[in-house]
Amino acid sequence: MSRTASITRTTSETSIELMLDLDGTGNTDIATGIGFFDHMLTALGRHAMLDLIVRAEGDLHIDAHHTVEDVGIVLGQAIREALGDKRGITRFGFAATPMDEALCEAAIDLSGRGFLVFDVPFERPMLGDMDTQLVQEFFQALTANGGFALHLTRRAGHNAHHVAEAAFKAAARALRMAVEPDPRAAGAIPSTKGVL
């Protein structure tokens, strides 16, 4: 069964086209107009082993907020669509990912309920042309629209680039674990309720 999604979303602020394959090999083709964000989405795709194509045009003459948030919305929708009824998935995922002095942890539950706990402070306001506050905005939009809980925590680190990259990679590795088919589940929905 193919676990893919293709979504187009256009508003007065952004226009986004996204294609996702949960069972990919980490191939990405990202163009949002925000260099650092492209770098983070590339890392997310590679370490979650998602094939991911993103084309985004936004009102960057204002700032990057709408583009980053709306890409999170569309990627979350795509993950939810590609997972279908979640039959046979592992459901939970966890990763602790270092990048030099930085260490971030991520725990995911593909529960059907969007929730973000974000404890990743940054010690400077900008990462290239991206406000560090937008890291949280991205994950908030992703989880709300993807329908999953994510706890993301910085355990160590001062370099803002390293902290952000460790956070994205930890989330990616946890997501990869959670979406993987569980060979012992025999195609069952991983919930005592029988639905996610």
Image (tube, rainbow, N blue to C red):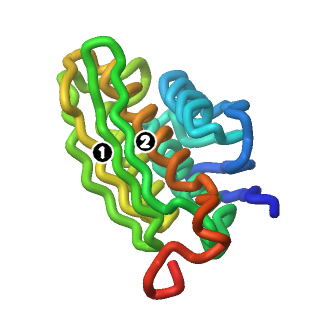
Q: Name the residue that disc number 1 marks.
A: 152
Image location of residue 179, percent across then percent down: 57, 55
Image location of residue 140, percent across then percent down: 37, 55
Which residue is at the far bottom? 193
**Compared to 158, does 16 lie above or below?**
below
Q: Name the residue that disc number 2 marks.
A: 171
Residue 155: quarter of image = top left
- Side of 7 relative to 97 (left or right): right
Q: Are marks 1 and 2 in contact (CB under 8 Å)?
A: yes
- What residue is drawn where x is 22% and y is 28%? 122
Which residue is at the far front? 184
Residue 176: quarter of image = top right
- What residue is drawn where x is 37% and y is 21%? 127
Which residue is at the far right? 1
Q: Which amino acid lies under the numbered mark 1 shown in the image of this protein?
A: Leu
Image location of residue 73, percent across then percent down: 53, 57
Q: Which amino acid lies under the numbered mark 2 shown in the image of this protein?
A: Ala
Image location of residue 92, percent across then percent down: 43, 58
- What residue is drawn where x is 44% and y is 83%? 192
Badge 1: how crowded within 10 Å, few (<14), some, or many (20+)? many
The answer to whether residue 17 is seen in the rendering is: no
- Provide the secondary structure element on which disc 1 rests: strand
